[in-house]
Amino acid sequence: MNQTRSHQLRSLLQSNELEFIMEAHNGISARIVEEVGFRGIWASGLAISAQFGVRDSNEASWTQVVDMLEFMSDVTDIPILLDGDTGYGNFNNMRRLVRKLEQRHIAGVCIEDKQFPKLNSFIEGERQPLADIDEFCGKIMAGKDSQDDDEFSIIARVEALIAGWDLAEALRRAEAYHEAGADGILIHSKLSRPDEILDFAGEWAGRSPLIIVPTTYYSTPVEVYAKAGISLVIWANHMIRAAVAAMLKTGREVLKDSSVANVEDRIASVSDIFTLQGADELTAAQKRYLANGQSTTGAVVLAASRGNALQDLTEDRPKIMIPIGGKSLLRRLVDVFKRQGIHSVCVVAGYKADSINVSGVKICLNKQYEQTGELASLLCARPEFQEDMVISYGDLLFRDYILQDLLTAEGDLVVTVDSATTADYISGSPDYAWCSRPDDRSLFLQEVTLEHIAESRESCTGEPGGRWIGMLRVRGQGMDWINEALDQLKQHENFNRMDIPDLLNYLVAAGKPIRVHYINGHWLDINVLHDIDRAMHFTS
């Protein structure tokens, strides 16, 4: 039988070990706190006020706080302890608050002995008047008399040290609250050292569970708290502070660049948000209600060569297994595919194929990799072809949006072309692409077709539209074109020397329309040692 959340909180308070809970302020932050492994949530008054954009001085009504708690409770199974300020009024407000919290499966509430409306403890705390002891004890008793669940916890927060009173006053208040029925005492301090807290803990001597909030004395080793007999440590505002720091940084960068291209890979994906919102249920609903709308896009990665120009780095592994910032090239490529919903990935391997240990891929072997080119490798993957698939070189690094935009581009066969023809971030032999019209960056989704691909600019008249980056998307009639072309080309005596550009040129000559999707930078390929340095900067 599952433990109730109130029982879980009691277990934390009464544990023989030092326990920890983490702040959350809305549904998604509560889900994250549970997801990362915390056993309890502190519904911080400061953080909930901040996410509403108001001050921590009872400007958010208690009903608004309770409404937010309902969202937090709905998406989690671990106990929530509410930072209930002063109880939002007198004993009568406290009685109603406890009933409303129990209805929403909140495990407990912490109330502080200040006057309503309160002000945050770190804002001129020494000038804030404390509540009358008898009045506050009455509030505790009213709350305990109102609870239906015997294990619902009411924690009394002692603000005497914050308000400039001495240890004796803090202990006097704590003992009175304990006698009134409080299930635990939260002792608060704003000093940068835990001296006051440790002195209090020594005098308290375990009369009831003792809770602390080490916001200002955060550098103290937690072993000190355990030795002092502290029951529960609350990390009280770190999720909201982390969120604010990340949002400020991202917002400023997007404003400066007038683009989200450079931040997209460093922020949570939309899929991550879906997961936190309940991906399993959403997936089941999609299967039921969108049975014909499921993505079946696959990918074929051509990665049979060694990468000789990388010298010793490929002595015992193929190019795709070179680590870039702790992740292999192939791992990074597969992660991008997965973030865009492509989960069927076939890798055509050859050199040192047994060293490829990336999960989530199927390996197809080109045993003749030393004597054959890219088309022979593509032919090896033919049993894994899907009606909709991306074909990519294995040595690519690119921003997620490039693949995302390719997947939404119109056309049965679409190639990605970088229109920055003078860019210096591309090494090796360039695949210049001549196109039906140049990139007009003022227009989105231009209707442009491929005319020819070649390694030399002298191969065609006129200026190339850019460089093919080594990635294309095939679907619908395009799959028929690819299969027919492979059947025809494999009869040629020089088939083993043919690469993907040869296939594309063959299709163009056969009158098949190959759409061009233009990009402008934000990618690179790994060919030589200098590219490793570029890649480290690219992924940082």
Image (cartoon, rainbow, N blue to C red):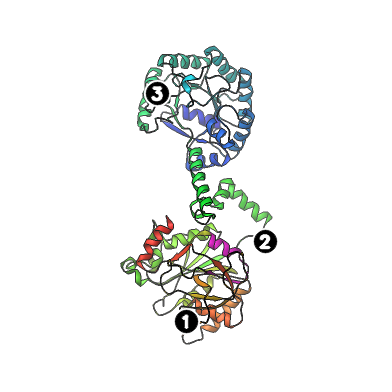
Q: Tell which circle, 2 or 3, labels the residue nearer the N-terminal end.
A: 3
**Residue 350, relative to residue 399: is it above or below?**
below
- 64 in magenta: no
> What is the secondary structure assignment of the residue under circle 3?
helix
CA–CA distance in space, label 3 to label 1: 78 Å
Q: Quadrant of residue 367?
A: bottom left
Q: Residue furthest left?
A: 312
**Residue 36, relative to residue 351: is it above or below?**
above
Residue at the spot 65% in from the left edge and 54% down from the top edge: 286
CA–CA distance in space, label 2 to label 3: 62 Å
Q: Position of residue 82 (x, y in %)?
A: 55, 29
**Mark 2 Cα within 10 Å, few/some/many (few <14, many 20+)?**
few
The residue wearing badge 3 is 197
> What is the secondary structure assignment of the residue under circle 1?
helix
Residue 1 can be seen in this image:
no
Q: Position of residue 453 (x, y in %)?
A: 51, 77
Is 540 placed left or right of 142 in the picture? left
Under mark 3, the amino acid is Ile
The residue wearing badge 2 is 292
Q: Nearer the viewer, residue 155 or 8?
A: 155
Magenta range is 401-419
Residue 279 can be seen in this image:
yes
> What is the secondary structure assignment of the residue under circle 2?
loop
Under mark 2, the amino acid is Asn
CA–CA distance in space, label 2 to label 1: 48 Å
The residue wearing badge 1 is 458
